[in-house]
Structure formats: C-alpha cells, structure tokens
Image (cartoon, rainbow, N blue to C red):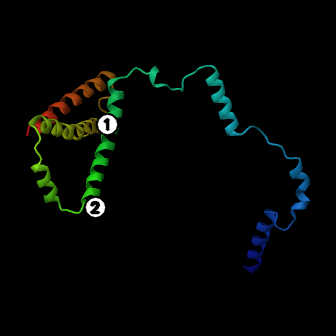
C-alpha cells in the first residue's frame, strides 16, 4: 500500500515537471508562438466590420413586428418582477420602519385623497396581480399542451387582457 502511494505521488510530481528544472525547457518556451487570434481580437474585428458597414446590432428591435404574444410575454415577466419587488420592499419596510402596521394604516387614512386618485391607485395595484394571475393560468394551459395554434394564442391573449381589465375595474370599485 505504501509503495502504491509513493508511486502515485512520484508520478504526479513527474507529470507536473517539478523534478526537472525550468531551464531544460527554455528552448521550448523561447520559440512558442500563438496558435491563433484571441477571442478579444476576433470580437474587435467583428465590431469594426459591422460599424464600417453601418449594420444594426442583430437582432435589432426595429426588425420585429410587435405582436400580442410577444408583448404579453414581456409584460408577464415585468409584472412578475414588479410584484416580487413590491412584496420584498413591503417586507423590508415592515422590518426596518420604527412604527407598527396600525400606525402607518392610520397615517394613510388620515391623508385626504380624492376618489379618482383612490380608484386609480386601486386599479394600478390590482392590474399587475390580475394580469400575472390570468396570464399564469394561460401558461399552465400551455404546459398541458393546449392552445398552441396561432389563432388560439391570439384569442387567449385577448381573453386574458379583457378579463384582467374587467377584474381590475371590479377590484378598484370595491
């Protein structure tokens, strides 16, 4: 067993060239040349050529025709980020702010806002929640393999948008 360990250690040392001095390999190091260009050089050539030809960055947003599914996908991600950021900010505020929840609730009640501002605020809070919920249900239907044909994708997009607006108006009216 001990001989096997010594063999493995000496093999590793020999492989790494630790037994030999670097001066023996000096001839090899002096004549080494790079095998090709670096990735940075290739990238610089690419950008110089595209700048010279006045090419836009590809794929450029201007070449796409904006569609309902594309906008809804971007909006779904945006509402997800906004909702998680809002919940995180609320939780952080609950931990950091000096007063308790009833104090801040009374503070908001003491402010005099007009009914239009309150209705708009409720709608602005309800819309992302409703949209993310209904569009998430749409995505769950897609996970089941339903509604992948292009007309169905557009139809479900219009339905989600309509139901979201109606639900948000209903919640804002409460």
Front one among 169 and 3: 169
Q: Position of residue 133 (x, y in %)?
A: 24, 40
Report the residue at 33% width, 23% height from top: 150
- Spatial separation of the CA atoms under disc 1 and disc 2: 30 Å
The quadrant the C terminus occupies is top left
Neighbour tally class for label 2: few under 14, some 14-19, many 20 plus, Cα within 10 Å:
few
Mark 1 secondary-structure assignment: helix
Give the label, 1 or 2, closer to the camera. Answer: 2
The picture quadrant where one finds residue 25 is: bottom right
Is residue 4 among what the camera can see?
yes
Report the residue at 29% width, 29% height from top: 147
Mark 2 secondary-structure assignment: helix
Is residue 143 among what the camera can see?
no
Front one among 58 and 51: 51
Residue hosting label 2 = 96
Q: Position of residue 21 (x, y in %)?
A: 87, 65
């Amino acid at each position: 067993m001990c001989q096997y360990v010594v063999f493995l250690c000496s093999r590793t040392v020999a492989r790494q060239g630790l037994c030999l001095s670097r001066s023996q390999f000096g001839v090899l190091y002096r004549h080494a040349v790079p095998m090709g260009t670096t990735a940075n050089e290739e990238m610089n050539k690419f950008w110089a050529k595209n700048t010279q030809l006045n090419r836009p960055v590809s794929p450029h947003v201007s070449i796409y025709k904006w569609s309902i599914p594309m906008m809804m996908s971007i909006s779904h991600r945006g509402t997800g980020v906004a909702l998680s950021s809002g919940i995180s900010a609320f939780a952080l505020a609950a931990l950091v702010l000096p007063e308790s929840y009833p104090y801040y609730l009374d503070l908001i009640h003491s402010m005099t806002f007009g009914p239009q501002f309150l209705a708009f605020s409720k709608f602005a809070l309800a819309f992302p929640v409703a949209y993310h919920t209904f569009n998430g249900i749409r995505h769950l239907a897609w996970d089941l393999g339903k509604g992948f044909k292009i007309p169905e994708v557009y139809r479900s997009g219009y339905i989600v948008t309509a139901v979201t607006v109606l639900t948000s108006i209903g919640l804002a009216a409460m």
